[in-house]
Image (cartoon, helix red, strand yellow):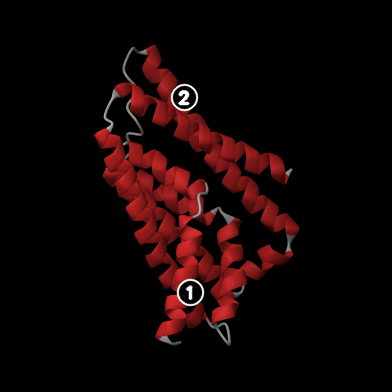
Amino acid sequence: MTLSLLLSFAGVCFLLAILPGPDSFLVLRYSIGGSKPGIAAAMGVAIGGLFWAVLVAVGLAAIVEQSAAAYRVIKILGGLYLLYLGVRAFMARKKSATRGVPAAPVAASMRSAFGAGALSCALNPKVGLFYLAVVPQFLTVVTFAGAMALGVVEVVVAAIVMGAFSFAASRAVELLRRPRVTDWLDRISAGVLAALGAGTVASSV
């Protein structure tokens, strides 16, 4: 495996990482609460890619590609998880409002943010299909070591891109640290996650 091949694969991964999707909105949501939970969620999303790298490396992801039922189940689970995150955020806001306490934007521990990011990526079958479609283009023979090497490259690229996105988002929120601004950002991000989850589930049934 040559350096030029790895750099080419890294370029493809970069294009994938900058495209907006459920993982991006999840990272944005946690970034509203601060740079630490945002970056933790970004690292979780990146590490979650290794789940699909391992599946491709051992050949199990081909089952998802060939089985419409398996793909649908994973897609529904991912949609339900996003819907859960969005609804939970709305319920937390409602609970805070009932108590007369201003809603804090996504107050989350780094562990929970990391776990949410990793689970979101692991339940996104499009990441697995990306590996299935792209990895064979860069490997003459798909081996466990080769697939995992490319998986590590994808994780590093995703970590850099998502980490930079999280840092920029958290800094932007700090510059606009007004209750009304953060309140609306919090509402919008929760709404987008819930809508993405509901849309994913609806399109799968």
Where is residue 178 shown, x and y percent of the image? Answer: 28, 25
Question: Residue at image x 56%, y 75%?
Answer: 135
Front residue of 181/70: it is 181
Q: Badge 1: how crowded within 10 Å, few (<14), some, or many (20+)?
A: some
Quadrant of the rendered structure where residue 164 is? Answer: bottom left
Front residue of 57/27: it is 27
Q: Nearer the viewer, mark 2 or mark 1?
A: 1
How far apart are labels 2 and 1 at the CA level? 42 Å
Front residue of 191/18: it is 18
- Give the secondary structure at mark 1: helix
How many numbered circles does the render carry?
Answer: 2
Q: Looking at the picture, does residue 10 appear above or below residue 92?
A: below
Question: Residue at image x 35%, y 26%?
Answer: 181
- Give the secondary structure at mark 2: helix
User: Which quadrant is home to the C terminus?
Assistant: top right
Q: Is residue 128 left or right of residue 168?
A: right
Q: Badge 2: how crowded within 10 Å, few (<14), some, or many (20+)?
A: few
Residue designated by label 1: 9
Quadrant of the rendered structure where residue 198 is? Answer: top right
Q: Is residue 130 visible?
A: yes
Q: Looking at the picture, does residue 6 appear above or below residue 125?
A: below
Question: Residue at image x 58%, y 65%?
Answer: 130
Q: Is residue 50 visible?
A: no
Where is residue 20 shown, x and y percent of the image? Answer: 50, 49
Question: Residue at image x 64%, y 43%?
Answer: 200
Q: Looking at the picture, does residue 95 appear above or below residue 30?
A: above
Q: Is residue 80 left or right of residue 86?
A: right
Where is residue 24 shown, x and y percent of the image? Answer: 46, 48
Amino acid type of the residue that numbered disc 2 sits on in the rendered structure:
Met
Amino acid type of the residue that numbered disc 1 sits on in the rendered structure:
Phe
Rendered image: mark on residue 91? 2
First in sequence: mark 2 or mark 1? Answer: 1
